[in-house]
Image (spheres, rainbow, N blue to C red):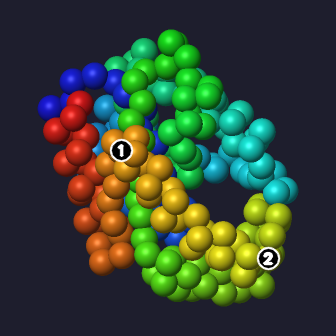
Amino acid sequence: MYKSSKVYFISGTSGVGKTSTMDYLKELLPPDKFDIRDFDERGVPNGGGKVWHSKETLHWLDVSAENAAQGKSTIICGFNEPARVRAVLNDTHPPVEIILLHASGDVLKNRLLGRHSTPESIDEIQRASGVSLDEFIKNCVSYSPQLRSLFEKEGCLVIDTDTKTPKEVAEMIVENLTNRT
């Protein structure tokens, strides 16, 4: 069923359903074969930034190499781009596949407004992103079509999440893993 160890990045802008899907992936995939992680689980510094993001990408690639030595694949759920991964990838890392979760602008806006409805969650998104909630949502909505185009040009799997539950998205990812690994 699963032939070799790989690292899979499940990417997309905030609001596409990465974290919700991750919970179902943990239910659907055997833990002795897959280590499923949140890209941000070690914390995000104030404002995040490209330097932090590159270091964190390298960290997860290194974790995936350790997992591969034990016969496990690694799934990292969090924003990334193919070029960013390639920039830190080296020959000690297992093969990489990046899957994009995509949602329309209206769906993203509604999901993000729903998620960040308390003063605490608004403060946290402003701290981590370095911009206001309105600017953060605007950035996600405007970048989403560009990100989709970038992933399509790379030949990556793109899953639209507008009308799918997180469980359905996870099932599509699992189907992809069993057909391509």
Mark count = 2
Image x and y of residue 113, in percent: 60, 85
Mark 1 Cα-neighbour bin, 10 Å: few <14, some 14–19, many ≥20: some
Nearer to me, 32 or 158: 158
Left or right, 33 with reference to 142 = left
Mark 2 Cα-neighbour bin, 10 Å: few <14, some 14–19, many ≥20: some
Residue drawn at x 63%, y 49% is 41
Q: Image quadrant of residue 136?
A: bottom right
Q: Which residue is mark 2?
A: 132
Secondary element at tag 2: loop
Left or right, 57 with reference to 125 = left
Q: Is residue 36 visible?
A: no
Q: Is residue 34 above or below residue 26?
A: above
- Image quarter where the N terminus lies is top left
Q: CA distance from mark 1 to mark 2?
A: 31 Å
| Camera-nearest label, 1 or 2 | 1
Q: Is residue 47 above or below residue 112?
A: above
Image x and y of residue 56, in percent: 67, 37
Q: Amino acid at mark 1?
A: Cys
Residue drawn at x 42%, y 71% is 103
Q: Is residue 5 visible?
A: yes
Q: Amino acid at mark 2?
A: Ser
Which of the labelled discs sits on residue 156, or is there none?
1
Residue drawn at x 42%, y 64% is 102
